[in-house]
Amino acid sequence: MWNNILIWIRNNSSVIEAAAIVVIAIATIAIARLIRLEKQGQRADRMPVLALSEIVELHETTYSRALYVKNIGYGPALNIVRKIGEMQLVLGSLASGDKAFALFRSGREIPILDNPTFRALLECDDIFDHHFEFIYENRKLSKPRRISKRKMSSTDANRS
């Protein structure tokens, strides 16, 4: 029996080589995909993600609305600048889970984030000096977008 197997292998060596090449190619592709997924996971583990939240406060007979920026990502957000209308404001830096005050309005008008004309732009850096931009408009917050150069310098904006 072993003798027959050895003879078959000797007579079909090109088929065996082709099968080995296919197996190696598939393994190489699988390893490359695993490495890419690991790099994406590492990037997500250190990337800041900024979100907006609104809190309604009742002071005796008046209502006020406060807008906060919160870092819901895993990495710290450094040099945060927010722009609402023409006013830029430096919010500083936020660790994962921290929030900072961003805007105040009084009255019973529409909630800040529900106003279809409300637009906010947030920019920040991560610990590797990569720059990210977040845009809130049409009642939606965009996904984090990596930008090559910041549009709003933290040195030119007003301090909070």
Image (cartoon, rainbow, N blue to C red):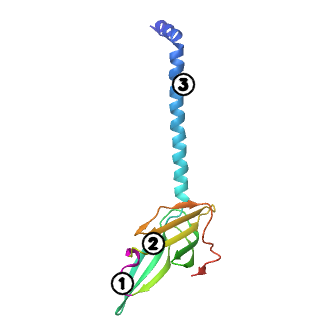
Q: Amino acid at mark 2?
A: Leu
Label 2: how many residues lie within 10 Å, few (<14), some (14-19) or many (20+)? many
Distance from label 1 to label 3 (Cα)?
Answer: 68 Å
In screen coordinates, is 64 left or right of 135?
left
Residue 52 image-quadrant placement = bottom left
Label 1: how many residues lie within 10 Å, few (<14), some (14-19) or many (20+)? few
Magenta-tinted stretch: 107-114
Tag 3 residue: 21
Q: Is residue 132 above or below residue 106?
A: above
Identify the residue at horizontal 46%, vertical 7% (top origin): 4
- Residue 64, image x and y in percent? 40, 86
Q: Amino acid at mark 3?
A: Ile
User: Magenta span has 113?
Assistant: yes
- Residue 46, image x and y in percent? 55, 59
Mark positioned earlier in the residue sequence (1 or 3): 3
Identify the residue at horizontal 57%, vertical 73% (top origin): 81
Residue 150 image-quadrant placement = bottom right
Mark positioned earlier in the residue sequence (2 or 3): 3
Helix, strand or loop status at disc 3: helix
Mark positioned earlier in the residue sequence (2 or 1): 2
Tag 2 residue: 52
Q: Amino acid at mark 1?
A: Glu
Q: Nearer the viewer, residue 86 or 102?
A: 86
Q: Is residue 111 above or below residue 144?
A: below
Distance from label 2 to label 3 (Cα)?
Answer: 52 Å
How many marks on residues?
Answer: 3
Tag 1 residue: 109
Helix, strand or loop status at disc 1: loop
- Residue 36, image x and y in percent? 54, 45
